[in-house]
Amino acid sequence: MSTPGTAPADRVPPAHRIDLVPRRSAAASSRLALGALIRRDLTVLRKNFGEFAGRTLMQPFLLVFVFL
């Protein structure tokens, strides 16, 4: 029996059904998310490499200046 405003499960198109069993494991999902984050970071790094290199070279000098 369906509640008002919802269709019975047999009438819901497959693209709109919610799976109760995940399609991939938690470890596989974590690896996929990590890969996406690394690809995003590499894309941003490629666009801003000059800024990144300058900050990376400047940081040790700033730390020595501040803490010594």
Image: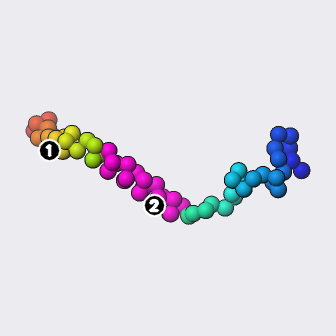
Instruction: Give the camera-side residue of 58 and 62.
Output: 58
* Above or below for 28 versus 44: below
Residue lying farthest to the right in this orientation: 1
Look at 28% across and 43% down and name the residue there: 47
The disc label shown at residue 31, or none: 2
The residue drawn where x is 11% and y is 41% is 61
How many numbered discs sit on the rendered protein? Answer: 2
- The residue under the point 19% across, 42% down is 50
Q: Position of residue 28 (x, y in %)?
A: 50, 63
Q: Which residue is mark 1?
A: 57
- Given the image, on which type of amino acid does mark 1 rest? Leu
Name the dominant secondary structure of the magenta segment. helix
* Residue 51 can be seen in this image: yes
Determine the image quadrant of residue 24.
bottom right
Q: Tell me, yes or no, whether the highlighted magenta stretch contains residue 65.
A: no
Please check the rendered image and state whether residue 36 is part of the magenta-colored stretch, yes or no: yes
Q: Is residue 25 above or below residue 5?
A: below
Q: Position of residue 54 (x, y in %)?
A: 16, 41
Q: Which numbered disc, 1 or 2, marks the residue that appears first in the sequence?
A: 2
- Which of the two residues, 8 or 66, is positioned nearer the viewer here? 8
The crowding category of the residue bearing disc 1, from other C-alpha atoms within 10 Å (few below 14, some 14 to 19, many at least 20), is few
Compared with residue 11, is residue 49 higher up or lower down, i.e. above or below?
above
Res 67 visible: no
Q: Quadrant location of the C terminus?
A: top left
Instruction: Provide the secondary structure element on which disc 2 rests.
Output: helix
Disc 2: CA contacts within 10 A as few (<14), some (14-19) or many (>=20): few
Please give left or right for residue 59 compared with residue 25 in the image. Answer: left
Q: Which residues are magenta?
A: 26-44
Q: On residue 19, which mark appears?
A: none
The amino acid on which the numbered mark 2 sits, given as a three-letter code, is Arg
